[in-house]
Amino acid sequence: MRVADFFCGGGGFSEGFRQAGFDLVFAVDKWKPAVMTYKGNKPGVNVILDDIIRISNLGDEEFENLVPDSEVIIGSPPCQAFSQSNKSGNADKTIGIQLIEAYLRIIARKKFKKNSVLKYWVLENVPNSQKYIKKEYSAKDLGVEGDFILHTRNNNSGIYNAKNFGAPTNRKRFLCGDFPELEITHSDEEAVTLKAVLDSLGDPLAKTKSDICDVNYPDLILPSTEITDFHYIRELAPFEWKTAKRLKQDKGYMGKMAFPENENNPARTVMATMSSSSREAMILRYQEDRYRLPTVREVASMMSFPIDYRFYGNTMGIKHTLVGNAVPPKLSYAIAKSIARENGLDVPNKYIPIQHDSDIKFVNLNGVILSINQEKPRREVAKFKYHIPYLILNSYRVELTNYHSDFTNNKFCWDAELHYSQGKKRAAVYDFEVSLDMIDEKFRKPIIRYINKIDKKLLSFDEFQKAYCKTERQRQESGELGPFELLDDVRNFICSLMSPLEMKDKKSIINGLYELPNAIIVGYYLLQHIIKKMGGKDNGCANKETETPGVDKKG
């Protein structure tokens, strides 16, 4: 059976059909590295660089001359507009909807034309896209002539997870169209793990020559020297992995994420961008107290690409995007196999090696030496807002911020704020003065001693801003205390002051107006009084006064 692939990317959707013995006759994408990758791995297929919206609106004769008939059409319109990771799902959906409708327009023109041969079609996208794909489209909706209704959801349309079809990744996708029921091959407990991927490939810098057996295709075995885009290391600088760790594990309202990656589970969803300091960054352990990003080959195996698949990009970033944007071949193979089964077609019982196009230049990352990134100083008006680390109790957190500064005139102020929860409906900020008598008596003397001790390290507001804008190494060399170091110090003191149970114990304050965990009250008190001392130093803001701990200005 013939297959046409729209928004073909690097060929992941088509790869599953290739492995199932289908005849790939046409593919199109508007990104050149994707087209070159498709050509490089599938010589002989008519793959073109073009715009799908343009193609969908061509006149009948030109459209039919360009797009061949096929029994199967597959397509994965770009998903960035619908992704939850793009502005928390609030990105503009206009272009995303236009691309989906262009694909559906092509489906309709092939499906409802005279003597149509189209029997199956599939649209793949992120789960959130289903909200924007109507259950049916008329000819008028799609801007074409005719009197038909295109139904987008058959009984098998829905959310599928690639891990249930053998891909070592926890990647949920929405499939709709007209296709048979898919056969699940792996239960959640049987899913292939990240550890299986990493163990199968081995150490990227291993100097011993050995054969590598593909974790996804056991009958595919290649010498390690023939595994492309694998033999290199992208080690993370401490400032990168520390930032990522904080975002992964210290965002209480978003839930904790593993750091480094939990190798006993399938890989998390592979992203199209290769981030190193974000919550979504995929970070692997690299020796003791060192971390790295996965290689292009490792993420490709996570996505179930065979180890003989090549990614024709000139940079690591482009190659990573080719992988992250793809449909996992194992998922597409499940679709292809279901179609073959329904039509009584035989499916190859072993992996068919790829024959690459030798005329296309290929850049191999093997042997590339990547230097560790150096932290750069921040802009002098950089903003700061973060809470005492790993201290979010009952949805309360104490934040240190410079958001109330006059950034236009470089007049900086630092403040302590008590925050509750997140979101428009639940979030709240409380502003009250904490006095020493609100704190259990046994904690008071150590708190006073701590404040007097740390006073020697404190800077004025302006100097504190300058310290924040320096790199971590610069602060270490000068012995300066920046915002993150200050918050860490406060956190360490609180942990030494009280037990975990004492930290969580609630105390009623201000005539029962607030009931807060001990650690939150103490943290808020500490930051308030530390900031008062900072404000009273040279170059401090005029509205800040140095006060004796325990004296409530409002009382």
Image: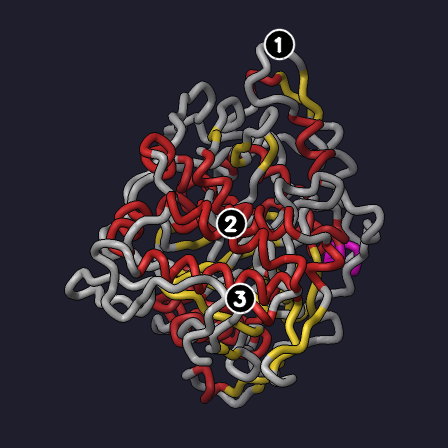
Neighbourhood count class around disc 2 (C-alpha, 10 Å): few under 14, some 14–19, many 20 upward? some
Q: Residue under label 1, please give it.
A: 208
| Place of residue 76 in the rendered image (x, y in percent of width and height, measured from the top left) | 53, 60
Task: Provide the major secondary structure of the magenta segment.
Answer: helix
- Disc 1 is placed on an element classified as loop
Residue depicted at 68% across the width and 72% down the height: 507
**Residue 36 placement, left or right of 292:** left
Residue 17 higher or lower than 296, as above or below: below
Question: Does the image show residue 35?
Answer: yes
Residue 178 higher or lower than 327, as above or below: below
The region drawn magenta spans: 338-342
- Disc 2 is placed on an element classified as helix
The residue closer to the viewer here, 443 or 12, is 443
The residue closer to the viewer here, 547 or 47, is 547
Residues at circles 2 and 3 in contact by the CB criterion of under 8 Å: no
Q: Amino acid at mark 2?
A: Tyr
| Place of residue 318 in the rendered image (x, y in percent of width and height, measured from the top left) | 40, 42
Q: Amino acid at mark 1?
A: Thr
Residue depicted at 53% across the width and 66% down the height: 84
**Residue 74 placement, left or right of 335:** left
Residue depicted at 49% across the width and 24% down the height: 232
Q: Residue under label 3, please give it.
A: 84
Comes first in the chain, label 3 or label 1:
3
Q: Amino acid at mark 3?
A: Gln
Query: Can you say which quadrant of the picture contains the N terminus?
Result: bottom right
**Residue 379 placement, left or right of 37:** left
Neighbourhood count class around disc 1 (C-alpha, 10 Å): few under 14, some 14–19, many 20 upward? few
| Place of residue 219 in the rendered image (x, y in percent of width and height, measured from the top left) | 74, 28
Q: Residue under label 2, please give it.
A: 450
The residue closer to the viewer here, 324 or 282, is 282
Please say whether residue 26 is one of the residues in the magenta stretch. no
Tell me which corner region of the image, top left, top right, bottom left or bottom right, holds residue 531: bottom left
